Image (cartoon, rainbow, N blue to C red):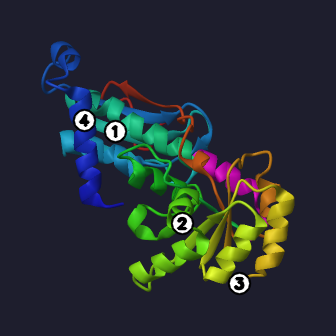
Amino acid sequence: MNELELDLLIRKALAEDIGAGDWTTTATVAAGTRAAGVLRSREAGVVAGLEVARRVFAVLDPRVEFRNRVADGERVQRGTVLAEVSGEARPILSGERVALNFLCRLSGIATRTRRLNELVAGYPVRLVDTRKTTPGLRMLEKYAVRVGGGHNHRFALDDGVLIKDNHIAVAGGIAAAVRSARAAVHHLLKVEVEVEDLDGVREALAAGADAILLDNMARALIEEAVRLVDGRVLLEASGNVDEQNIREIAATGVDLISLGRLTHSVPDLDIGLDLEPPGSLSPRGR
């Protein structure tokens, strides 16, 4: 993760949540009061975002101690202590919601990604995300996909050329679009073309595409496309992929399966912060 971008993101989230001041905390907790507690998972899942949570508290007060009990990428059960936190109570209470928002969101993405990866175990296929991310959180959400065992597609439009149906319609066809792209971009950028049928696959191959995205194709058509391409370019299957059909799509022999659902409409992993009186935790927590 880009640390400068991460700190800016955290500061923006804290400014949004705290506003002109945390009146509840300042009104009920005396300055200098100390507190300690644990971040605890309230359901089973895969953890992601502990460093983000730590930095939330550090931005408010660098003296807050944050000790990991697990690492990002670990599968945890309900009740598992993820980290211990201690220090002045005010910054801990003021940063609690933002830290949990990040941690729960990223852990939810990592959990779903791990589950889908397990469903395609045994097939040489990569699960990749898309740009269907929460605005402003792309860096973090794509990090969570990697923690869950997935891979990243483009981070942004400048990462590569992906010629989609609307580009093809405006450019005047697949061949014209690929030709224009090759003339406009440097030689290190790959050119991928989205197609909806086997004729599109043939056109993309003839045009010299580096990769072909099979959009919303039925399994039988995907299998035909795999035979037609015969390993000459990367094949990516996308569209309407879910837990029920992802394994049969992996079995077709495609190289990549892209899923917007890795990052959108993902339920958070339920994680809470439980504060206790100072000194109540053993050196290794409970």
Residue at 33% from the left image edge and 31% from the top image edge: 96
Residue at 48% from the left image edge and 45% from the top image edge: 106
Sequence-earlier tag: 3 or 2: 2
Residue at 32% from the left image edge and 46% from the top image edge: 54
| Residue 103 picture quarter | top left
Sequence-earlier tag: 2 or 1: 1
- Mark-to-mark CA distance, 3 and 2: 19 Å
| Residue 207 picture quarter | bottom right
Mark 4 against mark 2, which lies toward the viewer? 2
Q: Is residue 208 left or right of residue 186?
A: right
- Mark-to-mark CA distance, 3 and 4: 49 Å
- Mark-to-mark CA distance, 3 and 1: 53 Å
Identify the disc placed on residue 232: 3
Which amino acid type corresponds to the residue marked 1 in the rendered image? Val
Mark 3 and mark 4 in contact? Answer it, CB < 8 Å: no
- Mark-to-mark CA distance, 4 and 2: 38 Å
Mark 3 against mark 4, which lies toward the viewer? 3
Mark 2 against mark 1, which lies toward the viewer? 2
Q: Which residue is mark 2?
A: 163
Nearest the camera: 186 or 159?
186
Sequence-earlier tag: 3 or 1: 1
Q: Which residue is mark 1?
A: 85
Which amino acid type corresponds to the residue marked 2 in the rendered image? Ile
Write the start and end of the magenta stretch as one range: 111-124
Q: Is residue 26 left or right of residue 234?
A: left
Q: Could you say where residue 129 lies in the image, as x and y percent from the top left?
A: 56, 56
Q: Which residue is mark 4?
A: 14
Relative to 223, say whether 79 is above or below.
above
Q: Could you say where residue 55 lies in the image, as x and y percent from the top left?
A: 29, 47
